[in-house]
Amino acid sequence: MSLHASEALIFEIGEEGRANAYVETAKPLDTFLPKALLRDDLPLPDNTELDVVRHFTRLSQRTFGIDLGFYPLGSCTMKYNPRVNDQMANLPGFRDLHPYAPDEMAQGALQVMYELERSLASLFGMAAFSLNPSAGAHAELAALLIAKKYFKDNGQAVRDKVIVPDTAHGTNPASAAMCGFKVISIPSDARGRVDVELLKKAVGPDTAVCMMTNPNTLGLFEDHVHEITAAVHAAGGLMYYDGANGNAIMGNVRPGDMGFDLMHLNTHKTFTIPHGGGGAGHGPVGVAAHLVDYLPTPVVRAVPKDGADPKLAPSDRLTFTLDFDRPKSIGPMRSFWSNFAHAVRALAYIYANGAEGLTKVSQLAVLNANYIRVGIRDVLETPYDEICRHEFVASAQELKKLTGVRALDIAKALLDKGYMAPTMYFPLIVPECLMIEPTETESKETLDVFIAALRDIIATAKSDPQKIMDAPVNTVVGRVDETRAARQPDLRWRPAATN
Amino acid sequence: MYTPHTERDIAQMLEKIGVGSLDDLLQVPDAVKLRADLDVVPALPEYQLARRLSRIAAKNTAVDAISFLGAGAYRHYAPPAIGALAMRGEFLTAYTPYQAEVSQGYLQAIYEWQTYICLLTGMDIANASVYDGATALAEGAIMALNANGRKKVLVSRAVDPNYRAVLKTYCDGLDVAIDEVPVAADGSTDQDALRSALAGGDYAAVAVQTPNFFGVIDALSPESAEAAKASGTVPIAVVSEALSLAALATPASWGAQIVVGEAQSFGVAQAYGGPYVGFIASTNEHMRRIPGRLVGKSVDNRDQIAYVLTLQAREQHIRRERATSNICTNQAHCALIATIYLALMGKTGLRDVAGLNLERSRELATAVSSVEGCDLRFDGPFFNEFVVNVHQPAETVLAKLRERNILGGVALGRAYPEYADSILMNATELTTTSDIAALAAALKEVVNVAARV
């Protein structure tokens, strides 16, 4: 079968009764329950294992991942996902552990959570982390709920404003809205940083939280961050650090030292947990000392083990419990304690690097981003032309005026050359924006070839713009009719009889 | 470090950039410089890392015990083909499929997932997943709040206490109040109390779980469904044991407009609680209020079938503070695992697994209730778990079972102080006759009939 032919839906193949012998044949269901409680039919296809294996293998071949090629997706930190992490998460002692396993029979799992929490707290300068939230946006929500409860407990429920820069990730204002906060957007200045004077004017007795990411989404370090945290603190507000860009700072500068009270991490970005096509993620939420009591439940508690061998590693001399008795806590963010398998992966990555290695990781991520930046800045505008951190933005605005070729077209032409497209049209303040983040795991050769590919696309855009506007042509499908998808939503297959 | 840079690479790259050293690239104001030494776990070569984590994993002795733990996380058979397919690098290392042209495979798999959830629940549409069953309930409640603008939700007390706790966390943020419906004597939701609560007409939604936390098959009665309709309340069905959908009448059949739940049972590892995979399905009228990602079928510019993320105007990256939810990353890879599981099992396999769960749990119930001092607390029909009353502190009985390497179930006392004498027990297709015999024999030894209160 050619890769270009479409793949039938799983519902369109198979034959009833073509079953795999995974379990015994069961007695009819009405042996156990009255028919009135049972469903009449179950309209699912029966397929052999071979047909299922072929189907999903073909689907995998129609999917682009880091394992296939360079993935310069800004803000997403698509670095190599080491295989040892998956093997560790899949150890039977971790994989088959039930969440209600009693603490004394789950000491290893609790130790993993403890070691990860303590390592993250030190790396980012916070008093404590909770591994409860499931992803970055979930952790943002947890942090804002902490802020809301903190102000309520302190008789300051009037604080109902959340300040976000106009370069913020979309999840920041969306999370604020889920806590009933009103969002105030602060414009950036000519240098691409938060306009400190405007921010100072916006801060007041109604300020609850100011949410920032540093470096910001333009890839620039907010070098007045200490003035911002001072101003917000002086007004009685809290500072929140969006850790989506943690790969730029890890080991080199810490949100705690910058004055942040709350933060989250996307360990599926910074700590090599695979993105898996859009999750599961893992979003530890960190707090300064005055907010520890508000963390989601449960938290891992450690006490010294009686008579432990002093030669053992420090965490091996502890006994762990899950503590649910936290009267000030915002409560749980999800059903069970954590996306635990991901905590194992993140911890494995920290073991592979140590403090020195992690510090080098962010330095090399910054090196790689700057190397691409200087490699393309003579052919594509870089509106903030200075040393960037782990990512930078370029703009196709001039190219569009000249040729009609847009950022979208450049992105699609990169797909034809075997690359994932950069993040496009974000942040919103840069027209025809392309946001490029190479990560530290890519070699100089990979970056050189990518720079050449991007330069070649720009050259073609000038000589034969239609060719770029027609891209991609080497992919299994061309540009998809998104308008039709939205206007005539077809969100599922239906059995023929009920069509 | 998984970094390829040689010293020579670094020198050449710095020269091209025009700076002297890596430190020059990372200059920050003195005011924010590092104020402490970093204290993280030590660096280890890969073989030692694997050795250390394997030793830590071995401390989780619960995996070697005979277990009757369920209560929202279930032990089911997962064919090895799932791992072989899901762990393919193309799936594992892909980002969210924003670039449809190079993501057709994943997009199609999500479209298949959405279809499976619709077929299982009887709903019209389903999203690409949310974090877990508990957050699915919270997001489903928000859909209802947005549908009718009310500020209160009604929840059965037989809904998983973790789900209700998460719903409360979310509702605290939105300043939404939650009221609870009591449990009837048979372990199902008290329908009379439910109807009288609905009479006021001020609830956005009413949520009922089936099988409920006690394992009892639950629903809105026809009269209650009518009352919900009359009061403009959105009925939400909660399903934490997704396998039950293969056997039981669909939530659509008793009037649910939104079905939320947890699909961990479909091949996803227990993994001490996550990652799992929440689902949200609904009738068409709620399509524009559903949170998170949706995959739609369309065509490309070559007239081929093509899948694409759609109706994105609901989402945070477009709508920001006016989005239907803040969710961005979901649980795509767990949804893929569940989709592969459902494809491998098929109708025949899934019905067999459901039938075996019904059979083994009844064997377990018979064996346990034959032990003097143990009886079933509720007589409502159950799927694969049920509540056993041991007539003395359940924690004490469970501790004694643990000494015999048996995890007898989940004590109800923490969430339901009135049931501190009761244990929630689960059996699946993996529970053996000898497991059941071992538990019954141990209970005979540890249940103190004299202590009966």
Image (spheres, coloured by chain):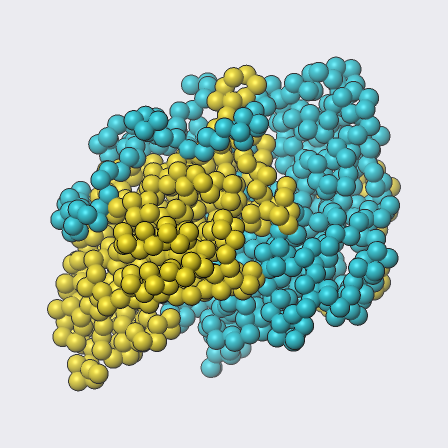
Chain colours: A cyan, B yellow
- Seen from the viewer's position, the closer of residues A62 and A412 is A412
Asked whether, in this view, residue B314 is left or right of residue A460, the answer is left
Q: Residue furthest bottom?
A: B450
Q: Residue at x 35, y 57 (%)?
A: B208
The image position of residue B261, as x and y in percent, is: 39, 51
Residue A346 vs A488, above or below: the answer is below
All told, the count of numbered labels is 0
Residue B268 vs B391, above or below: the answer is above
**The C terminus of chain B appears in which quarter of the rendering?**
bottom left
Residue A301 vs A360, above or below: the answer is below
Q: Residue at x 67, y 72 (%)?
A: A156
- Seen from the viewer's position, the closer of residues B65 and B396 is B396
- Seen from the viewer's position, the closer of residues A462 and B228 is B228
Residue A194 vs A391, above or below: the answer is below
The image position of residue A431, as x and y in percent, is: 77, 35
Asked whether, in this view, residue B415 is left or right of residue B9, the answer is left
Q: Residue at x 74, y 35 (%)?
A: A433
The answer to whether residue A245 is seen in the rendering is: yes
The image position of residue A492, as x and y in percent, is: 42, 33
Q: Residue at x 73, y 57 (%)?
A: A163
- Seen from the viewer's position, the closer of residues B189 and A342 is B189
The answer to whether residue A288 is seen in the rendering is: no
Asked whether, in this view, residue A479 is left or right of residue B68, the answer is right
- Asked which quadrant contains residue A201, the reply is bottom right
The image position of residue B82, as x and y in percent, is: 38, 41
